[in-house]
Image (cartoon, helix red, strand yellow):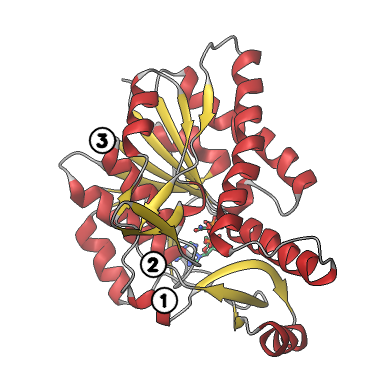
């Protein structure tokens, strides 16, 4: 039976530079179009951590070394990352749809998401963006650019920026209208451009919303049946990476909450996915959240793999 599915694409679906991204989105498009071919309605959301960091750094360096290049504020970098990723993704999907003779238009909606200006996240940056650095490089960046740089789960050092929670998707009606018209929509890219509401204006802020939480919000708004979070692992694990690692199949909200308390999910990587999955499964009877890898998306939705939270 056909389902309405919000897909949240993780970093490995996109690559680290334009060349890699063009290649990555080609393979990303295939499992997504598999789901569309089977009659499902699909809405796509994606991350932007590496990309927005790269754009922001490039803009800073360019304006520093060339007087005619203006300073580009962080919210504009967020918007650029949505356009850059959406452009590649929508073309890859378009190509794959044409190959299979499926006539559906694809559109990227530049999406803003309202956040609370008093969100405590603004005082405590946690969202890793951009490239990985060595300890020495990190120290130079902290000194010269006043970046906040932290160690990222044993993988190196990364700049972190505030990550407020999403409150409301500004363009939600447009997304719903396009979805109802059977168009394929890419929206809330990079978690959306965070904005605060001031009377009639929306003011962009320097932050990056977690795309897992923003995708969850999107899934509720479009009344999706499924939220599928695609990442690098096929299943969520207990004791991840340890000798007694155990992969999870179908689990209840109650069980996952217990596992969170026991500290099984890494902050900044698996924890937001699991929390977003719980929030969606809790939002209405029958809603399900699946965490699996891009390659296993089709089997996951067929109930053959992945971690399903119900
Ligand atoms: N308990 C866990 N089970 C599975 N993976 C985990 C767990 N804890 C941490 N991880 C790590 O989290 C990663 C997913 O987070 P991340 O790389 O930030 O996601 P994204 O795909 O959104 O970029 C997995 O690839 C895995 O390395
Ligand atoms: N915005 C966001 O969550 O990006 P990543 O998934 O790349 O961290």
Residue 116 appears in which quarter of the rendering? bottom left
Residue 262's place in the image compared with 71, above or below, is: below
Mark before the other along the chain sequence, 3 or 1: 1
Left or right: where does residue 271 sit relative to residue 14? left
Q: For the residue labelled by badge 1, is the local secondary structure a helix, a strand or a loop?
A: helix
Callout 3 touching callout 1 (CB < 8 Å): no
- Read off the residue under disc 1: 122
Which image quarter holds the N terminus?
Answer: top left
Query: Real-space Cα distance between discs 2 and 3?
Result: 23 Å
Q: Nearer the viewer, residue 170 or 265?
A: 170
x, y percent for residue 148? 58, 82
In the image, which disc is placed on residue 164?
2
Crowding at label 2, few (<14), some or many (≥20) Cα neighbours within 10 Å? Answer: many
Residue 263 visible in image: no
Mark 3 nearby-residue class (10 Å; few <14, some 14–19, many ≥20):
some
Residue where numbered disc 3 is placed: 223
Could you say which is closer to the camera, residue 252 or residue 294?
Answer: 294
At 59% from the left edge and 39% from the top edge, which residue is drawn? 86
Q: What residue appears at the point 37 percent right and 31 percent down from the top-left corner?
A: 174
Where is residue 244? Give x, y as percent. 47, 71
Secondary structure category for the residue under label 2: loop
- Asked if the beta carbon under badge 1 is closer than 8 A to the nearest atom of ligand 2, the reply is no
Provide residue 30's location: percent of width, then percent of height: 60, 29
Nearer the viewer's eye, disc 3 or disc 1? 1
Q: Earlier in the sequence, mark 2 or mark 3?
A: 2
């Amino acid at each position: 039976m056909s389902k309405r599915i919000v897909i949240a694409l993780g970093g490995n679906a996109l690559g680290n530079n334009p060349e890699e991204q063009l290649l990555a989105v080609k393979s990303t498009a295939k499992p997504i179009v598999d789901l569309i071919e089977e009659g499902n309605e699909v809405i796509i959301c994606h991350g932007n951590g590496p990309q927005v960091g790269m754009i922001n750094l490039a803009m800073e360096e360019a304006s520093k070394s060339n007087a005619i290049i203006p300073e580009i504020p962080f919210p504009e970098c967020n918007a650029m990352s949505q356009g850059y990723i959406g452009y590649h993704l929508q073309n890859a999907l378009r190509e794959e749809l044409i190959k299979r003779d499926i006539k559906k238009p694809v559109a990227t909606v530049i999406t803003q998401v309202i956040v609370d200006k008093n969100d405590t996240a603004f005082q405590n940056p946690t969202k890793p963006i951009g490239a990985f650095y060595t300890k020495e490089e990190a120290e130079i960046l902290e000194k010269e650019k006043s970046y906040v740089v932290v160690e990222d789960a044993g993988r190196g050092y990364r700049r972190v920026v505030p990550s407020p929670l999403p409150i409301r998707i500004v363009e939600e009606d447009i997304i719903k209208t396009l979805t109802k018209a059977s168009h394929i929509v890419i929206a809330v890219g990079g978690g959306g451009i965070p904005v605060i509401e001031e009377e009639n204006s929306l003011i962009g802020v320097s932050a990056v919303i977690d795309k897992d939480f923003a995708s969850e919000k999107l899934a509720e708004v479009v009344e999706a049946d499924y939220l599928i979070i695609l990442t690098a692992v096929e299943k969520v694990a207990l004791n991840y990476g340890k000798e007694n690692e155990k992969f999870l199949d179908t689990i209840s909200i109650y069980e996952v909450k217990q596992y969170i308390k026991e500290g099984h999910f890494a902050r900044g990587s698996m924890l937001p996915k699991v929390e977003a999955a719980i929030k969606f499964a809790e939002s209405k009877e029958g809603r399900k959240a699946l965490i699996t890898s891009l390659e296993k998306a089709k089997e996951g939705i067929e109930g053959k793999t992945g971690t399903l939270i119900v």
